[in-house]
Image (cartoon, rainbow, N blue to C red):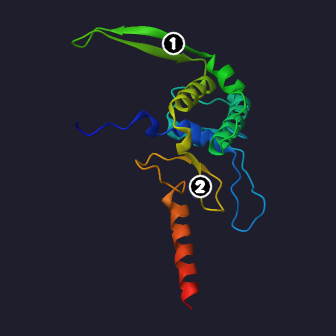
Amino acid sequence: MSTPRTSPERRPVPALVALANAGRPRRAPRARHGHSDDPFADLKSAQLLLDPLHLSCRVEANDLPVLWAMASEVTRIADALVHGETPPDPDVLNAAGAEARARPLLDLTGRTPAASNLWQYSGAPAELAHRVICELGSLDPSRLKECERPECTLVFYDTTRPGTQRWHAEDPCGWHERQMRYRSKGDDRT
Ligand SMILES: [Zn+2]
């Protein structure tokens, strides 16, 4: 067999991760409680958060309440999956997803006729809900993890082949953890 393509369960889930982390408290190193910035409090920060997802619909100011509700629902779903608990009903996702419409599209420009679905959305919430629903429907829940660095509560999706990723990102979390371990080893020797 030739090199296998990335299996479906290792495909990244960027919309899910962006929403799951959107309102997540970012704890300062020795602080007991996290402080969270709500990215859906204003249009600019919402657009900034969703920019990397390249939605075809523009985020508008009147989308902010439903996007906020969707993000908090997705956060609770991700938390439940990470901890092996029962997730809440995806009411917001399903309601927003109901505003997505598909129509069949026939393409005869290639050598063989090709059929596909052309998706149309009432706005950014419907498009985002569609993305998250598809991502959740095909992920491997055991690869959805919380960063192991104690100061970090961000969730990430482990797309490594062996599924051994421990930090949401090498920079800063992996780097900090290695530095801590190196220092504590140094302390042991003295
Ligand atoms: Zn982290």
Mark 2 residue's CB less than 8 Å from ligand 1? yes
Q: Nearer the viewer, residue 117 or 63?
A: 117
Mark sitting on residue 102: 1
Query: Disc 2 marks which amino acid?
Result: Cys
Q: Residue furthest right?
A: 33
Residue occupying image coordinates x 62% and y 51%: 154
Residue occupying image coordinates x 47% and y 54%: 164
x and y percentages locating residue 166 in the rendered image: 53, 56
Q: Is residue 2 left or right of residue 23?
A: left
Q: Nearer the viewer, residue 182 or 106?
A: 182
x and y percentages locating residue 87 in the rendered image: 69, 34
Relative to 16, say whether 29 is above or below.
below
Relative to 168, say whether 82 is above or below.
above
Which quadrant, please, contains the C terminus? bottom right
Q: Is residue 105 left or right of residue 102?
A: left
- Which of discs 1 and 2 lies nearer the camera? The answer is 2
Q: CA distance from mark 1 to mark 2?
A: 37 Å
Query: Disc 1 marks which amino acid?
Result: Ala
* Label 2 Cα crowd, 10 Å radius (few <14 / some 14-19 / many 20+): many
Q: Nearer the viewer, residue 36 or 74?
A: 74
Mark 1 residue's CB less than 8 Å from ligand 1? no
x and y percentages locating residue 146 in the rendered image: 61, 51
Q: Nearer the viewer, residue 188 or 37?
A: 188
Which image quadrant shows ligand 1? bottom right
Element marked by disc 2: loop
| Label 2 sits on residue | 147
* Label 1 Cα crowd, 10 Å radius (few <14 / some 14-19 / many 20+): few
Relative to 108, say whether 34 is above or below.
below
